[in-house]
Image (spheres, rainbow, N blue to C red):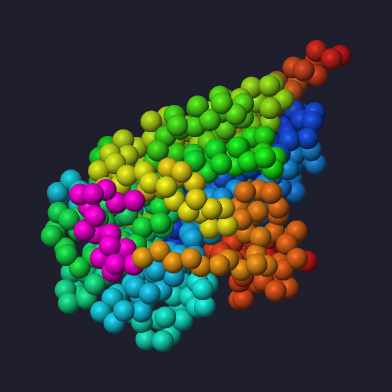
Amino acid sequence: MKFIDEYRDPAAARQYAQALVNIVTKPWTLMEVCGGQTHAIVKFGIDELLPPQITLVHGPGCPVCVTPLELIEKAIRIASLPKVIFCSFGDMIRVPGNSRDLLSVKAAGGDVRIVYSPLDCLKIARDNPEREIVFFAVGFETTAPANAMAVFQARSQGLKNFSLLVSHVLVPPAIEAILSSPSNRVQGFLAAGHVCAVMGYEEYEPIARQYRVPIVVTGFEPLDILQGVTMCVEQLEQGRAEVENQYARCVRKEGNAAARDLIKEVFRVVPRKWRGVGEIAQSGLGLRQEYAGFDAEMRFALSDFAVAESPECISGQILQGIQKPQECPAFGILCSPEHPLGATMVSSEGACAAYYRYRRV
Amino acid sequence: MKGGIMCLAIPGKIISIEETDPTLRSGRVDFAGIVKQVNLALVPEARVGDYALVHVGLAIGIVDEKEAQEVFDYLRQIGELAELEEGKAE
């Protein structure tokens, strides 16, 4: 596939590894923010190609993993209602709630459907005027334009039986939360390329300055990641802390103006709870007042309820780069993709699932 | 192509565009033989033949072909720099 295969060239990957050996003089710890990058790193063995001084830790950029249990419980309650068709991306279906997951709601007769795009829900809503169609809108900035577009179109088409259960999160506040934690060990970041394709990267510049940390906007193919690591290590070795763009073929400084406008039209910035981490101020998106009629939490009058995390699961530590999956005593023993204790093992983007799939010894 | 919320976006070649209402602008996009209908409303500059970056049924950007070689150009540059450094050391 054009724009994919050429970035998997093994000879060029080895040259990058060699270039890194030439550059690196000290140990450095970098975090790749996005779960898609984590999977590429583990799948292609990029971490094993790096000089031993460079450690990659895995970031919080897995939307399934950071969706709080409360919202999973809300999803389960809504999906169990007889008149509801509950639509979701596939990964969310198996995330365990308090006692069960969305898949078991489906098994018990609930109408739970996996969709490829939130836009598919509009047709389902038109075809089923007597039913309530609810979409589980989780995701980072990359997914926000599609969810915003679904609501925007629903309003302009006068669709009344469609709503979103919103659990949208934002990358920059999560990076700041990691950097201001006393246990932080991250010295440089590979920022998530597709988040920046939408949002641009101007909002990372004050973070790089304030925390004196290099941030390199990075793509998802092996050579992208190797170049991102090299650029980041080069900055660290030279004592620089700047925002650089490795992924210029897809990311412009200002992002996608039309997408940003659409997000602003439909969503506003709100505080959000991150699973395993806790509440982070101004770290998510919620529907604006003008679109409140499309908010499933209001439509189904769901109040907050406290839900306890599994005591054995250390996903909060994993999501902040403090521990790695194989350091968890439950990994591969009490916890596996078939019997997950936490979301980092469920999601195809979760760090634990990646290690289980590609690194189990 | 399995639906997922991974922030993965896949580049595919736009093979046709239907000009309708701007928010409904869509087109057929070819991902190495798999053709999908994609919403193109957020990439008004997109033309047939461009590579769209597609995430959950929506194009979020266009691949800039001029920048596509950057990953190899950078590799060459750091390789040449290393040779220069070695030259200095001798």
Q: Is residue A219 left or right of residue A255?
A: right
Return the residue found at the far bottom: A108
Q: Residue at x 16, y 63 (%)?
A: A159
Asked whether A140 or A315 is in front, the reply is A315
The percent coordinates of residue A340 (x first, y second) are 61, 71
Q: Is residue A24 above or below residue A156?
A: above
Observer-nearest of A4 and A51 = A51
- Write down the quadrant of residue A134 in the picture: bottom left
- Please indicate whether residue A215 sits to the left or right of residue B31 in the image: right
Q: Would residue A293 be counted in the magenta stretch?
A: yes
Residue at the image point whose x is 44% and y is 51% from the top: A272
Magenta stretch: residue A8 in it? no
Front residue (pair B22, A57): A57
**Viewer-side residue, A166 vs A16:** A166
* Residue farthest to the right, as pictured: B90
Specify start and end residues of the magenta stretch as a single range: A286-302
Q: Is residue A222 visible?
A: yes
Percent position of residue A154, x then y: 20, 58
Residue in the picture at 73% in, 43% down: A55
Residue located at (65% from left, 72% from top): A336
Please state if A74 lies on the left or on the right of B86 as rendered: left
Indicate left or right for A51 with A318 as reference.
Answer: right
Residue A218 visible in rendering: no
